[in-house]
Image (tube, rainbow, N blue to C red):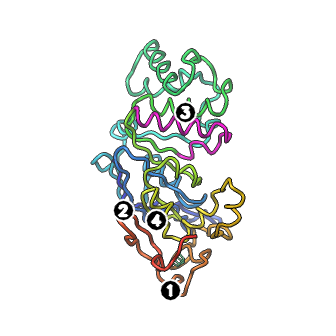
Amino acid sequence: MLEVQDLRKYFPVRGGVFMRVVGWIRAVDGVSLSVRRGETFGLVGESGSGKTTLGRVVMKLIEPTSGRIFFDGKEITSLKGKELLQLRREMQIVFQDPYKALHPKKRVKDIVGEPLLIHEKLNDTEVRDRVSEMLKLVGLNPEHVDRYPHEFSGGQRQRIVIARALILRPKFLVLDEPTSALDVSVQAKVLNLLSDLKDKFGLTYLLITHNMAVVNHFSDRVGVMYLGKLVEVAPTEELFGNPAHPYTMGLMSSIPIPDPKLAKSRRKIVLIGEIPSPVNPPVGCRFHTRCPYAKDICRKEEPIMEEVSSSHYTSCHFWRELVPP
Ligand code: SF4
């Protein structure tokens, strides 16, 4: 459904009196991946890893610096104008914060129904009917079409965001931290709703999250990003059962275990320090400044992606020797 090849997105850093370009933020720095039709591909990493930028480049909300993007068999890297508008019918995004994603002075009917006016030129009654039907599908009362966003709770607002994303019946959704702004009590409900809608409409998801528990529960395959690069890709069960990259192991160590005895006895890889600046990423393996297994070669040579097992790839010089905690 989606394929990206050697994708890069650099943002300029400006400085001095004339605001000249003095450097580049390498937010996404040579990522290649594919998302299969009907699957949920989870993209994980700490903030600053480049996963949100990747999601936005894929959605064509921002232009890539280089690389290629294919969607449903067609190259979309340089689509513009009418063709890009047409693509919007098929690809949609659910943003992280439902409080910011909804216009506070517009009614639900206008928020959810706006894409119908743009793409299908429906009249007011038709828009109202389609919006009511969609509200029902996302678990909201269809009679609330004339309410404003502030009259809903956080979980309900995220349902409105999802309704708007689905109103044109797209094939592909980027879910950018869809539950991280919500109370823990409603996170599971929204995730279950997304799972039901995926089955109902035959959707494909790119799920962007920093939450390993969410990605474990919800994804078919997972890609782990660090400082603009993909460092490991594997089917979810394989990744969680047999992680090969120290960064993935570190992320997993952060998942809380509800049993205090088990939690005390587990071996952990603690990720110390902050993710380095993407303006001057470390030479060699980008993770070497935080990796407990780093050796000399890691500071000089960048590891390449290698096959660990079928559909499982990682980029670490020493993955064969490491034992996951
Ligand atoms: Fe750690 Fe070296 Fe592997 Fe990088 S290549 S993850 S620094 S052991």
The amino acid pointed to by label 4 is Glu
Q: Residues within 10 Å of mark 1 (few under 14, many from 20)?
A: few
Q: Dot 2 lies on which element?
A: loop
Quarter of the rendering containing residue 254: bottom right
Mark 4 touching mark 3, by CB under 8 A?
no
Does label 2 point to a residue whose CB lies under 8 Å from ligand 1? no
Separation of marks 4 and 2 at Cα, in angstroms? 10 Å
Q: Which residue is mark 4?
A: 232
Q: Which residue is mark 2?
A: 311
Of the image marks 3 and 2, the number of the one nearer the N terminus = 3
Q: Is residue 182 magenta?
A: yes
Separation of marks 4 and 3 at Cα, in angstroms? 31 Å
**Left or right of residue 33, residue 183 in this image:** right
State which mark lies toward you, 4 or 3. 4
Asked whether residue 212 appears in the rendered view, the answer is yes
Image coordinates for residue 54, horizontal then vertical, percent: 48, 55
Residue located at (57% from left, 80% from top): 293
**Left or right of residue 30, residue 13 in this image:** right
Does label 1 point to a residue whose CB lies under 8 Å from ligand 1? yes
- Please report the bounds of the magenta region as a residue range: 176-200
Separation of marks 1 and 3 at Cα, in angstroms? 47 Å
The answer to whether residue 141 is above or below residue 30 is above
Please name whichever residue, 36 or 241, is drawn nearer the observer in this view of the structure. Answer: 241
Of the image marks 4 and 3, the number of the one nearer the N terminus = 3
Q: Which residue is mark 1?
A: 297
The amino acid pointed to by label 3 is Val
